[in-house]
Amino acid sequence: MENKKIDQAEFQKKCGKIGILMGGPSSERDISLKSGSAVYEAFSTSGFETVAIDIQTDNEAANIVTIEEQRIACAFIALHGRFGEDGGIQSLLDRINVPYSGSGVDASRLAMDKSVSSRLFAANGLHVAQHIVLEKDMFVSSGGRVPTTCFDFPLVVKPAKHGSSIGLSIVTSKDSLAHAVEFAFAFDEVILIEEYIKGRELTVGILDDRALPPIEIVPAKGIFDYEAKYSKGMTEYVVPASLPLPVARKVQEAAEHAHRILGCFGYSRVDIILREDNIPFVLEVNTIPGLTQTSLLPKAARVIGIDFLNLCMRMLNTAFLRSHNKTNVFDRS
């Protein structure tokens, strides 16, 4: 991937006042505040006119007032989870004509719903874990009976529309399956029960719609759960992943394909399991990747010489590529 230069002064002039949207009403609020604060600090300390906007509700009218009071020229979306990644905030910003970073409404909705995105991946030739979709109403009406599956243990149980591994369990026996299902339903009305793919856990950042070097994730406990993601020292990251070049390229191609299938724009982060036979299985696409000190997209960008400020500028540049007839501010020299 080419590391194109960006003219900071020109970009600063183009941006005007930047609103960093963070927080949100989802279970990922705390992580969003950390991501947003990191982005705010990067822009504000570099001389950009920037305001941090804490989104505390999914009420459209209230959020329109909150955003319009700040008179921003563009928005950097650092909202994770519900209302940030499901097309909610994107739809609102479209309505009030504020350019924003990243994917649009439809791609955000598709990526947020793992049951829908997995079906699209499979239909377009990507490998995905076999799974069943279970709805809470059906589960309750059956008296809490967990349907039988043809998958061997261990199994993965997770909410369909949550990130940061919230509500996720690795189930090793039938005795603990019902508890894992109830735990996942505490976070979502729809959950997935899927086969466990044994292999190496990888993530591929997408920037300018192109794949960055893959990163291998090696959790100390063997499970990349919420604690492993956001606690220092709980996970080792191999940056870039130690893979033969043909395998690395295969992983990157799968990530780019997943990004395109959903119609994502500019950037994302694609989580993949590389099975023991070197076949990549796509788990999910994150349209608003984390931007905390332990986050993966910034780690991948640094491998090719993109520092955090330049990463944020390139991410925000998508707002102008979308709204100004794809005018690019990057120096092509």
Image: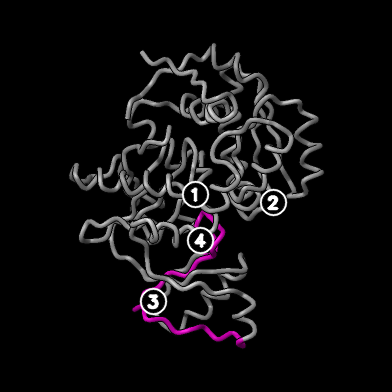
Viewport quadrant of the N terminus: top left
Element at badge 4?
helix
Residue lying at 61% horizontally and 22% vertically, measured from the top left: 44
Viewport quadrant of the C terminus: top left
- Which stretch is magenta? 142-167
Residue type, mark 1 in image: Tyr
Nearer to me, 63 or 261: 261
Q: Residues within 10 Å of mark 1 (few under 14, many from 20)?
A: some
The answer to whether residue 156 is left or right of residue 20 is left
Mark 3 or mark 2: whose residue is earlier in sequence: 2
Real-space Cα separation, disc 1 to disc 2, in angstroms: 19 Å
Residue 169 vertical position relative to residue 121 in the rendered view, above or below? below
- Which residue is tagged 2? 25
Residue 132: percent from left, percent from top:
46, 73
Nearer the viewer's eye, disc 4 or disc 1? 4
Nearer the viewer's eye, disc 4 or disc 3? 4
